[in-house]
Image (cartoon, grey):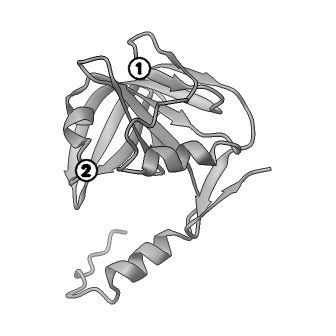
Amino acid sequence: MNTRTPRATERGFDSAHFRHALSQFATGVTVITTRLADGTFRGLTASSFNSVSLEPPLVLWSLGAGANSLPIFSGNSHYVINVLAAGQQDLALRFSRRSEANPFDGVDYELSRTGQPILKGVSAWFECHNRSRYPEGDHVIFVGEVEECAVHPQSALLFHGGRFGTTG
């Protein structure tokens, strides 16, 4: 039986409390990478990765609506989602800094079929066609159709309670 309940007239929490509650959900850590028209690369750390569908193979991630890289990821046809392994906390931090001049300096990577950077040592990667984008709240949700992927099973890098951890 369906029920209908009126929506709350006001929230019983603030943004800080909401963020703290969300931090109790342990997530994996990814670095999303893409290639710009001039041949340079852009990458960012994201923990908002999730599967959507097996057929067709779809995944999602989100990016802040005010991020300076939003036009790049919105406009490019492809990107790679690199799932970080337990020993790759330094990559997560490197690609999370806005002030990092070129976070790819000194980082080992190879190029995908479409020329996107795939970080070496990751536990999995997904090369995605940039299928759709949905603005929601203060973020944009990206849905990617996976065209290629690889897996290298190993302990994962996790983020929980504002700190990094690992599985296994």
Report the quarter where the N terminus lies.
Answer: bottom left
Q: Nearer the viewer, residue 43 or 11?
A: 43
Q: Position of residue 113 (x, y in %)?
A: 44, 9
Q: Position of residue 110 (x, y in %)?
A: 53, 17
Density class for disc 1 (Cα within 10 Å; few <14, some 14-19, many ≥20) is: many
The answer to whether residue 123 is left or right of residue 3 is right
Q: CA distance from mark 1 to mark 2?
A: 20 Å
Residue at figure coordinates x 48%, y 39% from the top left: 31
Q: Quadrant of residue 164?
A: bottom right
Residue at figure coordinates x 33%, y 23% from the top left: 40
Q: Amino acid at mark 1?
A: Gln
Which secondary structure, mark 1? Answer: loop
The answer to whether residue 159 is left or right of residue 165 is left
Residue under numbered circle 1: 116
Residue under numbered circle 2: 67
Which secondary structure, mark 2? Answer: loop
Above or below: residue 77 compared with residue 7 = above
